[in-house]
């Protein structure tokens, strides 16, 4: 059974709860991650969430999101979920927005409430092979045009993706050159802070 790490407002772990029951109309704050996969030309991999997902089904969003298991480093969770959801074997993972946080409610009242560090993943390999229970379809998009369309409201994406894109644009126009953040800025609950074994580019 998958479990998620519950957090207090300072980002410290205060418990665990099954993923299957954590999302309600009063979802507690918990630890998650978002990742943006880029190819060698700086194109970003977008995914449309499976149509039967509990939260935000069928919504276009970033490459992959997920929840680390208790005591699982976020970088390891990013790698695990990209392999499970998209069949990608990735190694070049770097945190770029270490303290991103958001809250979003669906029309039916179900809430997402996460501290959700954002990772850039550089990938040069075979095409994605999506798990249909997680991902309805995928597409590659030129980053600048995609980001401009999201911010201008010309392209509808998930709430978290829109807020993340607004912040990611401030890191510079070329996602391959974005500065890597310090793991010390990750939430206190992230084991990565205690074991820096996955340095990103330029570290």
Image: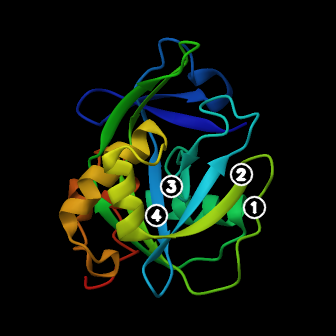
- Badge 4 local density, few (<14 within 10 Å), some, or many (20+)? many
- The correct choice, above or below, for 176 with respect to 163 in the image is below
Check disc 4 and report the residue beneath it: 36
Q: Is the C-beta separation of discs 1 and 4 under 8 Å?
A: no
User: Residue at horizontal 70%, vertical 71%?
Assistant: 128
- Badge 1 local density, few (<14 within 10 Å), some, or many (20+)? some
Choose the circle earlier in sequence order: 1 or 3. 3
Choose the circle earlier in sequence order: 4 or 3. 4
Percent x, y for residue 86? 69, 64
- Badge 3 local density, few (<14 within 10 Å), some, or many (20+)? many
Choose the circle earlier in sequence order: 2 or 1. 1
- The correct choice, above or below, for 30 with respect to 41 in the image is above
Q: Is residue 195 left or right of residue 73?
A: left
- Taking depth in this image into account, of 16 and 135 the one nearest to the observer is 135
Q: Is the C-beta separation of discs 1 and 3 under 8 Å?
A: no
Choose the circle earlier in sequence order: 3 or 2. 3
Q: Is the C-beta separation of discs 2 and 1 under 8 Å?
A: yes
How far separated are the C-alphas under marks 2 and 1?
6 Å
Image-quadrant location for residue 118: bottom left
Check disc 3 and report the residue beneath it: 62
Determine the secondary structure under disc 4: strand
Q: Is residue 13 visible?
A: no
Q: Quadrant of the C terminus?
A: bottom left
How far separated are the C-alphas under marks 1 and 4?
15 Å
Q: Is residue 168 left or right of residue 16?
A: left
Image-quadrant location for residue 102: top left
Percent x, y for residue 51? 74, 37
Q: Is the C-beta separation of discs 4 and 3 under 8 Å?
A: yes
User: Residue at horizontal 31%, vertical 26%?
Assistant: 8
How far separated are the C-alphas under marks 2 and 4?
15 Å
Q: Residue 135 bears which disc, if any?
A: 2
- Badge 2 local density, few (<14 within 10 Å), some, or many (20+)? many
């Amino acid at each position: 059974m998958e479990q998620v790490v519950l957090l207090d407002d300072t980002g410290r772990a205060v418990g665990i709860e099954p993923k299957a029951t954590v999302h309600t109309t009063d979802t507690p704050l918990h630890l998650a991650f978002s990742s943006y996969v880029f190819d060698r030309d700086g194109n970003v991999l977008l995914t449309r969430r499976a149509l039967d997902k509990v939260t935000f089904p069928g919504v276009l969003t970033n490459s992959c999101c997920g929840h680390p298991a208790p005591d699982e480093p976020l970088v390891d969770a990013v790698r695990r979920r990209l392999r499970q959801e998209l069949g990608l074997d990735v190694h070049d993972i770097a945190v770029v927005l270490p303290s991103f946080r958001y809250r979003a409610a669906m029309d039916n009242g179900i809430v997402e409430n996460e501290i959700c560090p954002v990772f850039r993943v550089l990938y040069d390999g075979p095409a994605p092979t999506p798990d249909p229970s997680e991902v309805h379809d995928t597409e590659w998009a030129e980053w600048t045009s995609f980001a401009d369309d999201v911010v201008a409201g010309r392209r509808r994406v998930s709430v978290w993706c829109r807020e993340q894109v607004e912040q990611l644009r401030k890191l510079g126009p070329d996602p391959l050159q974005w500065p890597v953040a310090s793991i010390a800025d990750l939430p206190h609950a992230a084991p990565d802070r205690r074991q820096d074994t996955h340095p990103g580019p330029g570290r």
